[in-house]
Structure formats: structure tokens, C-alpha cells
Amino acid sequence: MSFQAYLDNIQAKTGKRAEDFKKMADEKGFTASGKLKAGVKAGTIVEWLKDDFELGRGHAMAIYALLKGSKSEDSQ
């Protein structure tokens, strides 16, 4: 599955776009100025997304990669 397919599936399930997750991560204090804060681990993001949005690990890791900056919404 492509990275974009993960994002599309996440949006279909939650109604939230990648940009929405970036904003929420900032509001929760996981990111600052669009960058993941030092010390914020993947498990923290996975737990948040599982608890709040019922996302599985694979989909949550796609959002983590987005927040980390290793993937972008334009990645295929």
C-alpha cells in the first residue's frame, strides 16, 4: 500500500486530513512549528491515535512518519 493510500484510508475512517492530524499534534504538544518534539516516541503517537481514532498500528505509524517529516502528503 502506498503512503498516500494510508492517508486516504485514514481520512475515510476518521474524516480527518493529514493537515488536521498535524494541527492536533501541535495542540497536544507533540509537535512545535510542524516538527515532532525531541523525545516524542512512536508509541506515544500510536497510543493517541488508537485511543482517539481507533487507528491500527500501521495507519498510526503513517501519521507518525508524517509528523516526523520522513514522509509528506505528496509521497507516493
Image (cartoon, rainbow, N blue to C red):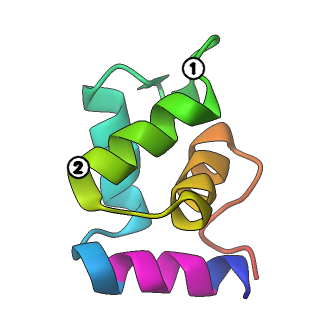
- Residue at (37%, 49%) from the top-left corner? 49
For image coordinates 35% across by 69% down, the residue present is 17
**Whole-percent x and y of residue 16?**
27, 68
Numbered disc in front, either 1 or 2: 2
**SS at mark 1?**
loop
Considering every residue shown, the one lying at the far top of the view is 39
Q: Amino acid at mark 2?
A: Asp
**Left or right: 27 in relation to 47:** left
Residue 2 relative to residue 48: left or right: right
Q: Which mark is residue 52?
A: 2
Circle 2 Cα neighbour tier, 10 Å, few/some/many (<14 / 14–19 / ≥20): few
Which quarter of the image is occupied by the N terminus?
bottom right
Give the dominant element type of the magenta stretch: helix, strand or loop.
Answer: helix
Q: Position of residue 30 (x, y in %)?
A: 43, 24
Look at mark 1 in the image and give the residue it sits on: 40
SS for callout 2: helix
* Residue located 59% across and 69% down the image: 73
Magenta-span inclusion, residue 18: no
Residue type highlighted by circle 1: Val
- Stretch of the chain drawn in magenta: 5-11
N-terminal of the two: label 1 or label 2? 1
Percent coordinates x, y for residue 55 in the rendering: 39, 63
Can you say whether 55 is above or below 31 in the image? below
Q: Are marks 1 and 2 in contact (CB under 8 Å)?
A: no
The answer for how far apart the CA atoms under marks 1 and 2 are is 17 Å
Identify the residue at horizontal 73%, vertical 74% (top origin). 75
Q: Quadrant of residue 47?
A: top left
**Tally of marks:** 2
- Residue 8 painted magenta: yes
